[in-house]
Amino acid sequence: MKFLSLIFKNVFRKKTRTILTIGSIILPLLIICIMGSFLKALDAPDPAETRGMFRIVTRHKVGFTNDLPISYVERIRQLDGALAVTTFDWFGGTYIDNSARNFFARFAVEPETFLQVFDDAKVTRGSIDDWMSDRAGALVGEDLMKKYGWRMGDQIVLVGDIYPVALQLTIRTVYGVSYGGSDGLFFNRKYLEEALPSFEGTVGTIWTKCRDAEAANRLSDEIDRIFENSPYPTITESEKAFQMGFVSMLGNVKLLITSLGIIIVLVIILIAANTMALSARERVREIAVLRTLGFTRRMILVLILGESLTLALIGGFLGLGGFILGLKPFKASLMDTPISGFASAIMLFPEVLLVGLGVTVLVGLLSGLGPAIRASQRPITEGLRHMG
Amino acid sequence: MNNPLIRVEKIVKKYHRGAEELTVLNGLNLNIEDGEFIALMGPSGSGKTTLLNLIAGIDRPTSGHVFVRTDDISSMSESGLAEWRSRHIGFIFQTYNLIPVLTAYENVELPLLLTPLGGAERRKHVEIALYIVGLADRMSHYPSQLSGGQEQRVAIARAIVTDPTLLIADEPTGDLDAKSAEEVLVLLERLNIEFKKTIVMVTHDPKAAARARRLVRLEKGILIEENHMDGHSSSGLTDGINVSGISAKSE
Ligand SMILES: Nc1ncnc2c1ncn2[C@@H]1O[C@H](COP(=O)(O)OP(=O)(O)O)[C@@H](O)[C@H]1O
Ligand SMILES: [Mg+2]
């Protein structure tokens, strides 16, 4: 302990160099922590943090206008990794007129499972039960409510264009989403089935909420394989095209992130080792003087390792501290980007902090090891004769 | 006491430079008695520093022995020798060799960090040592804020703070102006007379050598004893700092 002040004073012997070195530990460490958090988020997302993620959609292979047998829903529900399955049927129809201004999404859905799959939507007014208890009830997005100035209980009439029917819906429930738009109108498919018996037994698209990225990736292949040779072959994709690309690349991405992380660690070690080597070289004489005073080789070794460890720990704590403080704003800034789905799974993983700390200690020890061994092994007389 | 404090016995030290072999010390003998103040002179490159290093236990002889009392230090282990140095040797260098990032106080405290002394006790020892060298008011100065003479006095405080058996000074006035050199010599003389420190000092300066009680010359690898010089060497004492009350330090 009494050597601590000696170690500290030596660490800050060349202030500019020390600060630059600390900086070159902080920044890469931040990057490592961020990359680690991404990896972790991809790997084992917390169900509470994966709202809106890992959704895949199954439709008829030939095109949007071809329906699928409703029995597929039950079949998909059996698959491992499928947390919830729900259906979508495009109704279309006219609200007020056919202008683009009055166009919004209108779907017949299953109220029972709808919010399980679309778990990024939150009910803001009314409840799911309100919606389910009225067969002609509608679930409407906050944005849409605002656009038309609708209120709870308002009646909405959709006049069918493809289908010869007019739907009289009552707004029972309102939903919002934390990012993206909430401008859809959803109603019970049973109501549509009653009005249009031809709807019975078929669905437009089937939406599946998967457990994680792996399941999403696997199921999108598995589902299509199951129905490959049926009269109704399917094509299943991730909800968002980019996510599909991302998911299918997941293995590569992990490998890439991990290798980058290792390279960054090596670079930090080299930078810190360079600082330590310079610092030890400047002090060859001083170290010989310390040994003349009776400091043992072991003490010199510990002193120099202590210095490199101190240097790394200062950088490490600043880096990890910055990471902890910056994670929330960083995550928030990703919410409006295409990777929001994955970003939302990011949180302060203890494992990432542990890895950060481990990297710090590793950098501290490895960067000081060479200089420490060299300094402690040099004969005293040689050190004392050293010039400069 | 019949045993000399230090007994250097048939010391040989050879250096190798490539294929060339350089015999610096060639079967040298030297006895140092308790309380002596020896000046070691000799041409540059004659091996004075080499001899001091061997006596101080920071180098090992090619052959021969260095005994301190009855301990053969040439057969001690590295760590045993380090421990021995910390207790028995105070080394004063020509170029002071203070640690630039440490204050005068911290420099003097360094050897005490190797002892079991607690912080308060260390402080007492450091303050006394700095007081003896006349720099009690410069404790928190860094080496760069001190003159050469002051730096060397801090280095002397560092050398005496553990109350070592033997003080070794390698050209301690070599880098100093006449006035600072005089101060340092007075101080060494006082340490010898008043605090009974045994001192071996290498010097080129005959005036400095005259301060010592005994003069040996190193030539061609062996020592030649000069006549004892007596009497006048205590003259500097009265110029010294008043140390009444703290001389109890050297038991
Ligand atoms: N580590 C070493 N390796 C090779 N030669 C050395 C070494 N140390 C000292 N010498 C040589 O030994 C001789 C004596 O050196 P030294 O003891 O420093 O002399 P002095 O102190 O009397 O000037 C010199 O010629 C010097 O070059
Ligand atoms: Mg010399």
Image (cartoon, coloured by chain):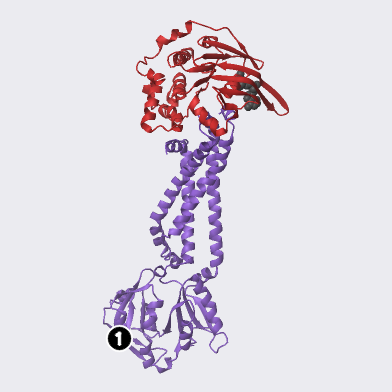
Chain colours: A purple, B red
| Nearer the observer, A66 or B134 | B134
> Residue drawn 26% across and 79% down?
A152
Chain letter behind tag 1 = A
B194, A339: nearer the viewer = B194
- Does residue A122 appear in this view? yes
Q: Nearer the viewer, residue B191 or B16?
A: B191
User: Residue B100: x percent and y percent?
Assistant: 47, 29
At horizontal 44% and vertical 28% (from top left) the residue drawn is: B107
Question: Does residue B134 appear anywhere in the picture?
Answer: no
Residue drawn at 49 percent across, 80 percent down: A79
Q: Quadrant of residue A83?
A: bottom left
Q: Amino acid at mark 1?
A: Ser
Quadrant where the image shows the C terminus of chain A: top right
**Which quadrant, please, contains the N terminus of chain A?**
top left
Q: Is residue A122 above or below residue A287?
A: below
Q: Secondary structure at mark 1?
A: helix
Asked if B45 appears above or below B123 in the picture, the reply is: above
Horizontal and vertical percent position of residue A24: 49, 47
Residue identifier under label 1: A133
From the viewer's side, name the closer residue of A285 and A224. A285
